[in-house]
Image (tube, rainbow, N blue to C red):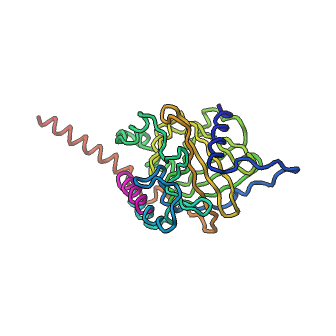
Amino acid sequence: MKIALSASLVALAGLTAVSAHAEPRAQAPARPNLEGYWRVNFSLALEAPPGVPQLIVAEKDAPAVAAKVSKALSDEATAGLDPELPMLVEQSDGLPIVRGQRRSRAVVLPANGKLPYTVAGRSETKADPPPSSTDNPEQRPNAERCLVGGGQPPLSSFALDSQIQIVRTRNEVVIFLEYGADLRVVRLTDRHAPRLLWTNLGDSIGHFEGETLVVETIGQPDADRMHIAPTLIVPGAATVIERFTPLSNRELLYQFTVVDPKVYAAPWLGEFSWFRTDKPMYEHACHEGNYSLSNILSAARHLEAEKAASAAAH
């Protein structure tokens, strides 16, 4: 399964003119230049925005397209998130950039920029989310409980002022995302860990193909299948494949796909670049001053008491 998935993504990457393999060398290649601090601050649409079928956008047209994407992100965030995300949208660096060119979207394959959802998958993106239980805090969504932030792969959500740190050791590559303080340890091996050791970020293994780090992740919580801002379905049974390719000392190309035949009818590929930064990372104290969880549960108990009182009166 792993070999087939990796081969499929290599073929997709080749169609985007990104070299996935380095030329043979007489000596061992230098360690890939992945380590350090990276920043992403773009208004990122996964799919082609309405009325913008082209992938590459001229610099003079980019602000108008960015405004359209930003409004869609703000509307989505306002409906289901804290209010700071729409504020961040206004402070973005505009459309994403790859090799100096502005991109209207992340999806590069299929060429029309539309994710190849199955009928069931597309219907799920348009449906209202199912209600979460209010009986116990453990039944509330992981993001609401601050158990995950923006670090669940692929890293396509919250591409607004995101700080990412990458550290490589002999046997692992560690990816730390400032938003939510999500830390993912990618083991450089070809065997996944036992299910008991999977985390809320799934189980990630990786290997190098030339200068490109290829990461395969399985086992993310199905309860977190709906990634938001922008919307992307990542079922618990899905395999996520990511490719990290340094294009220069300053730019890192991030490519990703989700493989799940129940949700996606064909292979697809998304990409955008991260850029090196010297800005410091800060603590993301998700629950500091956050009364949402207790308010949700106490409000539910209040409504239950009102309902019981009304039933007793009749």
Q: How many marks?
A: 0
Query: In the figure, is residue 71 to the left or right of 301?
Result: right
Q: Residue at x 30, y 44 (%)?
A: 300
Q: Residue at x 26, y 45 (%)?
A: 302
Q: Which residues are magenta?
A: 66-80
The residue lying toward the viewer, choosing from 218 and 183, is 218
Residue 304 placement (x, y as % from top left): 25, 40
Quarter-wise, where is residue 290 in the image?
A: bottom left
The residue lying toward the viewer, choosing from 249 and 135, is 249
Residue 200 placement (x, y as % from top left): 54, 42
Q: Quadrant of the N terminus?
A: top right
Residue 265 placement (x, y as % from top left): 50, 34
Query: In the figure, is residue 67 to the left or right of 99?
Result: left
Q: Is residue 222 above or below residue 109?
A: above
Quick check: can you spot residue 283? no
Quarter-wise, where is residue 166 in the image?
A: bottom right
Residue 171 placement (x, y as % from top left): 75, 45
Q: Residue at x 41, y 33 (%)?
A: 120
Quick check: can you spot residue 25? yes
Q: Is residue 282 above or below residue 32?
A: below
Q: Is residue 91 magenta?
A: no
Q: Is residue 194 above or below residue 89?
A: above
The residue lying toward the viewer, choosing from 276 and 282, is 276
Q: Residue at x 36, y 56 (%)?
A: 75
